[in-house]
Image (cartoon, grey):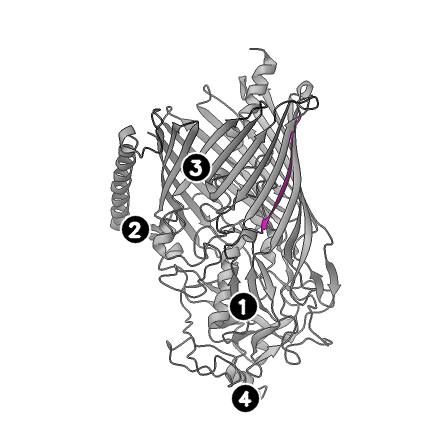
Amino acid sequence: MDNKEKWIRLLANKSISISSMQLVDVRSSIAVQFQWKGKVMQKKSRGGFLRKSLSMLSLGLVAATLSVSGYAQEDALPALGDGASPWKVDVFYENATHFRGKDNTGNRVGLSKFRNTLQAEADKDIGSGWKFHGIFRGTYDGVYRLNDDEYGNKAGGAVSLESSAAPLLGAPSNMTPFGQGTVNNATASGLLLLTNNVFGFNSTTPGVIPNPATPSDPAAGVPLPYNPNQGLRILFDRWATNPNGVQVAVPVRPCDVDSRGCTDFGGYGDKKRSELEAPEFNSKLDFIREFYVRKTFDLDDGKQMFVKVGKQQVVWGRTDLFRVLDVINPVDYSRNNIYDELQDIRIPMWILQAEYRMGASDTFQDRNVSVVWNFDQFRPNNLGQCGTPNSILDAGCILRAFKSLWDNGGTVGNFANVVPPTPGLPSGPGNGAFLSTDFGPHTVGIRNVELPEWSFKNTQLGLKWEGVTPGGVSFSLNAMTGRSQLPSLHAFNVGAINPFIGTIVNSSNLIAFDLVYPRISLIGGSADFQIPEAKIAVRLEGALTTGEEFGDSTEASLYSKHRVWRSVIGLDRPTIIDWINPAEATLISGQLFYQHIFDHKSAMGPYGPIGMGDWANNVTGTLLIRASLMNARLNPQVVFARDFKAHAFAVAPSVSYRFSDNLSMSVGGNFKFRADQERWNTADERDSGSFLPFGGYPGQTGPGSLGVAGLVPGGAFRAGPIGAAWREDEIQFSLKYKF
């Protein structure tokens, strides 16, 4: 075998080498996937309970393994046709144990994952050219019991929120406990002489306090929900400080223990502890990872028709790591945030694929046209439930916090204006002064979640034309129409209660939302080719989407639609580095992801920037260096990632070792760094003028943001997944055994 052939074969297997890291698009940000995290932090042992839990888990896994092994016998599996070929079954068990260090609160998190996975993969020829493929996966994560004061029934606690102007009014502190906001029913009645106000909520007595709203409120007379100062955290407290910014408390316990803010956001957000522990065993039967049949039909003209139907993953695109064209299946970020391989976190859907294989022509070496129809019930990306180890960009916490605010009311820190910020100066400590405010139910937050019902128009349809040029360039042209896999918040103008007067108002720029999944369309393409002289493989991918929605403080609805261009360029080169391994090549792989939002809206208000929180342009770069030692049994690697606009950086060293064909282990860590937090601040709608004339700022004559900035909620998207996770450094151990 000559050197060129060796190189080509190495490039052909490149995806195996770099599969431990992925970059995916999350609204305007790029999420970097590593298989390992940073520094180890020990948490106190739970002694007998820990040992008992591990013993029970071991017995359960042994029983599950024996069960699957029994089904792996040919005669024990269903026939699925008359084919005489034997079943081919692979079974593996994997344990992933993660430890997380101190977060931004100064507390050690400790165990953040104790995930045990048992997976069986089965294949069989079932006759007449049809083939069956199935993957079945069951997962149990013991972290919700082994570290229950962080992620289980004991998570959260009592919180206090900032009221920076309170000392100006004679208060001894600028912090107020949840349920004791500086602006409440009593202060509004006494100081502002608003005797019909409905500020305040029930934080003391379960279910006996009547709603003080006037009879014009449909909810008048209904007992106020009980919203105590228990089981709470401050939104973003794990990764950011927010002096003088708006603050919101969010419930973090499983939904069977604490139902506040729990609702179905699209397959997540309302899970009890048992469902978080074993997420695949749900009404969607997600333990069935793949379940499909396929067949190739030979046509009279020498062409072929390939058909594949069932529960499956459809992978579009040429580049590794990025979700640019790979948009057919939604993604489950709750499994391990952005750190698992895409093949493990794509959510399989019931899909029909039909591919017309035309073969070579005078112009191309090969040609195919394929149609993809995702006829399953719509499912969005799973952004993770607040209170679990993995809620990407804190999005699950934003949604739960805002839903709880609408349903139950709650204290919002630094909301009411006392001393406006000085125009032209950065927001933060010493610039402006605000009071914590107790809002009643149905005033601010998320009112409804509008999940698309099944209908033909709500299914997803994709078309791909691909070929190979005479010069060896593989390419594709892609088109897709469907629903966005990410939610959008639409502010409504009728239906929220004005807390100053206790009636439902008709007003622009209400800080009250319905959550929707808008329709989008995509066109794009990909290409990959080799430059033999430089020993480089080049991968290109790009897509233009229409209909995407972004938060926008210049609009009364607080969102706007835009076209978005995303693209990736990747360069891969196997290189002999003598001091690493003079006999085997070291893979060096770099990628640049670019995103541009067309017609991006940004302006300068009296108190700061207004418009879209998402960056108009952003670039994220990655670099992978992976070596092969000891005849590929030992594989050290390091991954670097940089979100240039967010000023966030990550590095992930790791090493994996294969003891045998059946047993392997890996250990590693990732570390994240950031620059100035202030660049993530964006208009937070305190100054939207929702309840004029009471809630305005000096000079405000109508609704619309003036530029008062904070981190909640848009700062997470500016920070990106690297910046928002900068205090989630972990070490990770994994052990995998294939039966």
The residue to which callout 3 is attached is 292
Which residue in the structure is indicated by mark 4? 195
Label 1: element kind? strand
Q: Is residue 123 above or below residue 273?
A: above
Was residue 174 drawn as part of the magenta stretch in this picture? no
Precedes in sequence: disc 4 or disc 2: 2
- Say few, some or many: other residues with alpha carbon within 10 Å of mark 1 (under 14 / 14 to 19 / 20 or more): many
Q: Position of residue 250 (x, y in %)?
A: 47, 63
Closer to the chain start, of discs 4 and 3, is 4
Among numbered discs 4 and 1, the one appearing first in the sequence:
4
Dominant SS of magenta comes to: strand
Coordinates of residue 403 in the picture (x, y in percent): 49, 65
Name the amino acid type tagged 3: Tyr
Residue 164 visible within the image: no
Is mark 2 in CB contact (under 8 Å) with mark 3?
no
Asked if one can make out residue 162 in the rendered structure from this viewpoint, the answer is: yes
Label 1 belongs to which residue? 445
Q: Is residue 452 above or below residue 665?
A: below
Q: Amino acid at mark 1?
A: Gly
Q: Are marks 4 and 1 in contact (CB under 8 Å)?
A: no
